[in-house]
Image (cartoon, rainbow, N blue to C red):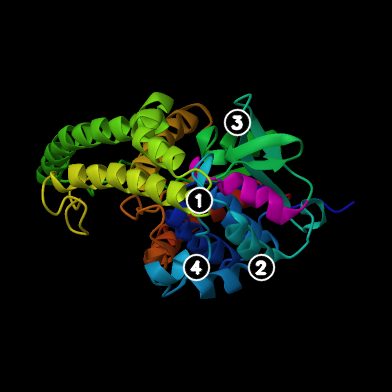
Amino acid sequence: MAQKEPRIGIALDSGGAMGGAHVGVLEVLAEQDIALDIIVGSSAGAAVGAFFAAGRLKEFRDLITDLSFIHSLGYYVDPVFPYSGLLAGDKARRFIHSLVGDVLIEDLDITFITVATDLLTGEIVAIDRGPLADAVMASIAIPGIFRPVVHMGRLLTDGGVSDPLPLDILKGYDPDISIACNLHPRMTSRYSSTRRKSIVAAEQEAHELEEDLASGMVDRVVTLLNPQAIRDSLKSLTETVLRKIGSPDADTMLEAHYLKILKEYLSQGSQRLNELKPGYFSAGAGDHRMNIVEILLNTANIQQYQKNRIMLKYEPPDVLIEPDVVDIKALDFSRSAAAIEEGRKKTSDAIPKILELMEKNSPSS
């Protein structure tokens, strides 16, 4: 009976556009004839791992290389009323499906697992069967950015929320050699001391201005919705209509007068806006502030960095690959080429150790 080669598994970290590094990692492993038996991916790691497992990594690489920021938006931006997320996620799923089609996870040649998070129970959800496109979409549904995904009878969100570097799940499949690609070896250095001070100062100033704006707008809305205020405003109109009862123009007069009242209220709201700092809402006014998307993504990166530190301490891999891509913003796919190259470089450095472990775990050893 022929003895089997050592089973090799890899855990791929979450990280948005930083996940381009995974492309480089998987390319170099393939070029070195290091066959992967198990891939476990979270968020960006799930997406790149899925494209690799489905044999579509080259197509994905070709798409994201030299991709401009504006062009990248066309692949995933589909705004919805911001109730459970800013984006619907339908475009992102169509993009994934365009690459992997209707393939089922259990039909892949590689054991493949995506990681998502149950938004209602907090459980880590390892998806190892069913439509690949649906599993990946569930894993990349960044909270606040994409709507949660209904899948497997659960309400699922990004795998990075609960298990960004899923070494624990990988080791549950008992590989002989475990590899991890950690995209969060440190915190970002995008914010210098000077920039941090300017952000804090801008946020403080904005807080004071927005507090004034919010107060004024609330007053306007409350007044508009207050039945007594509406009755008072329509008093003169009522008297006029009563005097002209029977006139065929009564309905038109009522509508016109009511619209006039609404315009007066809205005009007062606009005046309130104009009293604020000039240029406050202009394109360049908020350069020093963090917008809501940046806040959500920075929060996710901080959580992932801290969780990865703990995971690597208690579930250390045999081989750790750490591409230095933390300064790439999560949605800045225009830097994918640089991320891929960094992934290739760090994996090339790790090849000797992987080959050594393969030799030690080979049947003839």
Secondary element under disc 1, as helix, strand or loop, is loop
In this view of the protein, can residue 67 be seen by the observer?
yes
Tell me if residue 350 comes above or below residue 336 in the rendering: above
Residue 172 shown left or right of residue 240 in the figure: right
Query: Which amino acid type corresponds to the residue marked 2 in the rendered image?
Result: Leu
CA gap between label 1 and label 2 equals 66 Å
Please report the bounds of the magenta region as a residue range. Answer: 131-146
Secondary element under disc 4, as helix, strand or loop, is loop
Query: Which amino acid type corresponds to the residue marked 4 in the rendered image?
Result: Gly
Residue position for label 3: 119
CA gap between label 3 and label 2 equals 27 Å
Q: Nearer the viewer, mark 3 or mark 1?
A: 1
Q: Label 2 near label 1: C-beta < 8 Å? A: no
Residue position for label 2: 99
Query: Which amino acid type corresponds to the residue marked 1 in the rendered image?
Result: Ser
Q: Nearer the viewer, mark 2 or mark 4?
A: 4
Q: Label 4 near label 3: C-beta < 8 Å? A: no
Q: Label 1 near label 4: C-beta < 8 Å? A: no
CA gap between label 3 and label 1 equals 60 Å
Query: Which amino acid type corresponds to the residue marked 3 in the rendered image?
Result: Leu
Q: Nearer the viewer, mark 4 or mark 1?
A: 1
Residue position for label 1: 247
Instruction: Residue 130 in the image: state x and y as whole percent.
Output: 79, 49
Mark before the other along the chain sequence, 3 or 1: 3
Q: Is 142 inside the magenta-drawn segment?
A: yes
Instruction: Residue 287 in the image: state x and y as whole percent.
Output: 19, 53
Q: Label 2 near label 3: C-beta < 8 Å? A: no
